[in-house]
Image: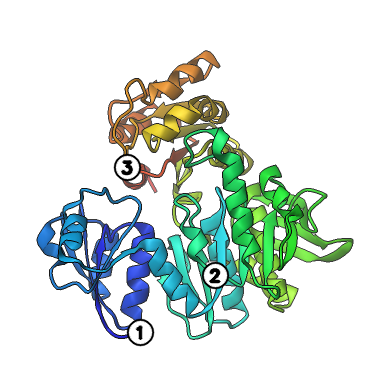
Amino acid sequence: MAKQLYHFIGIGGIGMSALARLLLARGQSVRGSDIQQTPLLERLREEGADVRIGHAAEHVEGAQRVVFSSAIASHNPELSEARRLGLPLLHRGELLAEIEREARGIAICGTHGKTTTTAMIHAVLRGAGIDASLALGGIDAALDTNAHLGSDPWFVTEADESDGSFALLDPVIAVVTNVENDHLASDDDLPHLVDAFAEFLGNLPANGLAVVGADDARAASLLSRDLRAAAIGTGLCETAELRAVNPQPRGLTTAFDVVAGDAFLGTVELGVPGAMNVRNAVAAIAVGRHLGIPFPQIADALRAFRGVRRRFDVLCANRRMIVVDDYGHHPTAIRETIATARAYHRGPVIAAFQPHRYSRTALLAREFAQALCAADRVYLAPVYAASEPPIPGVSSASIGEPLAKMGADVTCVASVGDLETRISSDAPSGTLVLMLGAGDITEVAARLARRVEMQTPA
């Protein structure tokens, strides 16, 4: 790859920044812009990127390739200027595919768990001495980054089905964790999404492997499709060819036995909590076994695995309060996260949720309410719009009203920042607080954790 200047519009996005880091590690010149300063942008500067705050047409001057994502509006001034100048434009998925084609790809997709599963698979390969490259939709707690340029030919990456860009990839191994409605306009589109996953798996080579979450009915249906590659169902259910049995929560870890068909392989003491992480781990085990990694080495890697930031990320834990930051922004993920909190903590559980996108809130309001009602108390922040315009009549109250009718103790706050003061004053001692959402609630979670630590006597 000849050295070029890449300009990233929205370089602070978690997927965009991973690609920028990979290019920097390969000796490419990287420039980018984003709307506000963040610690991630500062890290990119330290790694050699020219990062500018705000979007302006002049930022693309001199660029040889301009990278954008589906989150960038068509009228963005940098995108418009790049078109006017005739600069080569690359969607984020196209650049990821370019990088992946130079390696042997392991691609992980699905509605829930793909970031953690990706990190687990990379950890399993590291544990076996395989220095694979990585592009991750989160910050790996062990690596303290979302990207790694490895010396071996394997490349482990998330594959994004939300914008269809996963179809651009050409992996040898693919994982589908589950299939739910997260980015669709209605459930009527779900059969088309299942077909898209089937087409993705159908492109795997004959010597490849499709790993499919058998606990999810839509995903499991992919196992009956006509695939060239070998396929294996994984999970907790009895129909899974490779499955976890006898899961035992142990604080922030989980122990379980692993069975392949009728054969007992051994026990795993997983370094992160929750049933969803057990499912993720079994998928990682399937990939590791396909690559010939001995089970004891796989188990050791999963024991040492410390997760991904913002996935049941315990920011502070003392007798006053436990504050957990979690990316959960879909009803299924929220339900699983609250269940994990219940298994870990015997005291009260508060869920503070910032809905992400008006369209998702409108479509899944009742499902959000049903998931959140498992908490003892719920706080709802205003909707984080992301790139969407408001939808009339859609707000956090769209979730709060059905929650109240279910008998839940629910409070809607005026701004996400209000959560810090309300929860710190309202929550009784011994409460576990889940700060849930894909928006800027993570910043409030960090402030709340610092406040609790400062106010709690040693």
Amino acid type of the residue that numbered disc 3 sits on in the rendered structure: Ala
The residue beneath circle 2 is 170
Residue 71, x across and y down, in percent: 33, 50
* Residue neighbourhood size for the residue with mark 1, other residues' Cα within 10 Å, grouped as few (<14), some (14–19), many (≥20): few
Q: Does any portion of residue 78 appear in the rendered image?
A: yes
Does residue 427 show up?
no
**Above or below for 171 versus 184:** below
Judged by depth in the image, the label closer to the viewer, 3 or 1, is 1
Q: Mark 3 and 2 residues: CB-CB less than 8 Å, in contact? A: no
Task: Give the residue type that dot 1 points to.
Answer: Met
Residue 114, horizontal then vertical, whole percent: 55, 56
Residue 118 higher or lower than 279, as above or below: below
What residue is disc 1 on?
A: 1
Q: Residue 10 in the image: x percent, y percent?
A: 27, 57
Q: Nearer the viewer, residue 161 or 236?
A: 161
Query: Eyeballing the image, is 309 above or below 421?
Result: below
Q: What secondary structure is marked by label 1? A: loop
Callout 3: helix, strand or loop? loop
Q: Which residue is mark 3?
A: 386
Q: CA distance from mark 3 to mark 1?
A: 34 Å
SS label for mark 2: loop
- Which quadrant: the N terminus? bottom left
Q: Residue at x 51, y 79 (%)?
A: 103
Q: Amino acid at mark 2?
A: Asp
Depth order, front residue of 228/124: 228
Q: Earlier in the sequence, mark 3 or mark 1?
A: 1
Residue visible at 45% across and 69% down in the picture: 97
